Image (cartoon, helix red, strand yellow):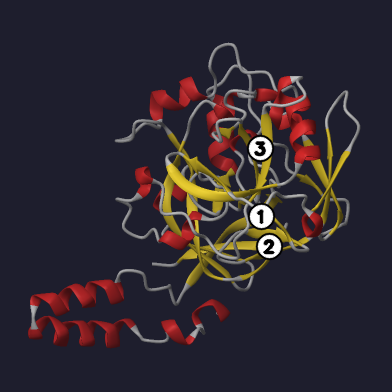
Amino acid sequence: SSASSNSTFDLSPKTIIGVGVGLAAVSGASYLLYRHLTRDIMPQKWRRVGRVERIHIFPVKSCAPLEISSPNPVFECDVLSMSFEGLRDRTLMVINDNNEMVTARVYPHMILIRSKMISPSKLLFSFSGLPDLELDFKNLESPDKDVRTSIWGVPVDVMVCGERHNQWFSQAILKKESGMKLVHYPYPKPVRVTNPRLRSMPFIRQEDSGTFNDATSYMLMNLSSVDDLNTRLKNPVDAQQFRGGFELKMDVNEPYAEDNWKWVRIGKDAVFRSVAPCTRCIFPNINVQTAQRDADGEPFKTLRSYRLFNYSSPALGIHLGLRLPGKVKANDVVYVEDN
């Protein structure tokens, strides 16, 4: 496959093991190098498991996914994030006057703040009761000074988008004229260190941290797993409540198969390393249509009953780190390593 044609990964397993054995004979330190060389080798063989049913880009962290009117949109995947015609996933975020991250965990109606693309550099935001607001990435009214905020304790310096946007988001979230700021991720590459909860994961890299993502740039949801969860719930949930970039429709119904995958390839080129399970908070309890929290604390409550493992929170879905860039679209075939 084209994914294995990259020269970085052309060494055969036999060659690598031969090199490793030779190195190990030299010294223990060299053996550590051998482990480093062999720990993340991309598979030579792939097997099909399904296809991509839906792809989501969330321009603003905690808000609605991007509305795309063009048929069969093609998305670019690079190390920073997924993008559509230059518009990236989660490069915008809301912070409060104390420069603290603001999410729908506290303000559920944020998920009803919608966005659509006017041009590759322009977004149009809409929210019930407010006039639409345009944002032009090429013409941000940003003050000279960056603002320091953090995402789950990991600091990052950001650009404020401008007073007009601050006021609109304050009105949408607080029904006030001020109190919220819309900020932009200004860097061409991932700059945040790894989320502390994930640092023990052996295959995660610093550059997997993405833009304003909680954990990594990419997350995949297996719809078979969501379907199985829904058999346990009184009120079934929409997979979008888990806010995955990729929603996978399996060829054969296999709930939780993703727990054991090491590598994922989507389409011809884009290759991802599974780096961590996605542990869940109360966010998926918010109905994507109504922005109402579930009165019974579902699906979080049910997930805790059977998906807790050794984590403090239940897991559903997998965090991915990009290892080879590529284009992806709905209906692309999804492959995993063929052992």
Residue 122 position in % (x across, y down)? 84, 54
Amino acid type assigned to the residue bearing label 3 in the image: Gln
Name the residue tied to disc 1: 52
Q: Give the residue at mark 2.
A: 332
Residue that appears at 77% across and 46% down: 66
Which residue type carries mark 1?
Val
Pointer 3 with pointer 1, Cβ within 8 A: no
Q: Residue at x 29, y 35 (%)?
A: 310
**Residue 37 occupies which quadrant of the picture?**
bottom left
Quarter where residue 335 is shown: bottom right
Viewer-side residue, 274 vs 229: 274
314 relative position to 91: left or right: left
Q: Are marks 2 and 1 in contact (CB under 8 Å)?
A: yes
* Mark 3 vs mark 1, CA separation in Å: 14 Å
Mark drawn on residue 69: none
Relative to 65, say whether 48 is above or below. Answer: below
> 155 above or below 241?
below
Res 255 seen here: no
Mark pair 2, 1: CA separation: 5 Å
Q: Nearer the viewer, mark 2 or mark 3?
A: 3
2 or 3: tag closer to the N-terminus: 3
Front label number (3 vs 1): 3
SS state under label 1: strand
The N terminus is located in which quarter?
A: bottom right
Q: Which residue is mark 3?
A: 240
